[in-house]
Amino acid sequence: MRLEEEIKQKKFKNEYHRLGVNIMFTGAWLKQINIQGLKKFGLTSEQYNVLRILRGQHPKPASVNLIIERMIDKSSNSSRIVERLRIKGFLERNVCPHDRRQVDVVITDKALKLLAVIDEEEFLSEKPLQNLNEEEAEALSDLLDKLRG
């Protein structure tokens, strides 16, 4: 469905204005799909993002600063997210042996198993993106990279 129909707006100032609104609308739409899908696993999209970062680091530990650098939503309170994931048993926090001010974070086997289950789900961003063929997906991804400069 066209953006104009989705948000009930007939005119935009120009095509750049329409593009900006379309990107924000589509981002929110994809995020909502992920939120709904992750809800049954008791995770927020930010918690899921942190677990994916830690899985990418596995078996090496990650500092909270590394997690912040790699998060999609940089405004998230990563320390709070890390603590909630620790309480759920999805990660461990240890004082870094080389720098006692730094905390090392490591994903647990429990979280790795949960991520494997989530990977099999089709609700995440991939399914709605399959409205595009692979060539279109690559072109759009390249254009988004170009947009961010």
Image (spheres, grey):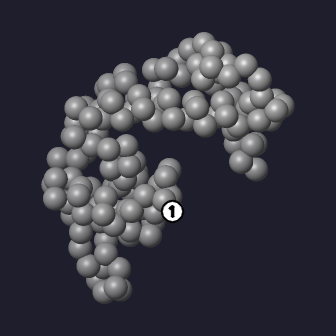
The answer to whether 87 appears left or right of 18 in the picture is: left
Residue at 77%, 35% in the rendered image: 17
Image position of 54 with respect to 6: above or below: below
Image position of 131 with respect to 19: above or below: above
Q: Quadrant of the N terminus?
A: top right
User: In which quarter of the view is residue 63 placed?
Assistant: bottom left
Name the spot of residue 46 as percent of width and height, x first. Answer: 38, 49
Residue at 31%, 75% in the rendered image: 103
Q: Secondary structure at mark 1?
A: helix
Name the spot of residue 22 as percent of width and height, x first. Answer: 66, 30
Q: Nearer the viewer, residue 22 or 119?
A: 22
The answer to whether 105 appears left or right of 27 in the picture is: left
User: In which quarter of the view is residue 95 placed?
Assistant: bottom left
Q: Residue furthest right?
A: 14
Q: Nearer the viewer, residue 27 or 109?
A: 27
For disc 1, the marked residue is: 69
Name the spot of residue 91 as percent of width and height, x first. Answer: 23, 58
Residue at 27%, 43% in the rendered image: 43
Residue at 58%, 32% in the rendered image: 25
Tell me the kind of residue under disc 1.
Glu
Name the spot of residue 4 as percent of width and height, x first. Answer: 67, 19
Q: Nearer the viewer, residue 135 or 24?
A: 24
Q: Is residue 127 visible?
A: yes
Q: Badge 1, how many Cα within 10 Å: few under 14, some, many 20+?
A: few
Image position of 24 with respect to 108: above or below: above
Q: Is residue 52 visible?
A: no
User: In which quarter of the view is residue 131 placed?
Assistant: top right
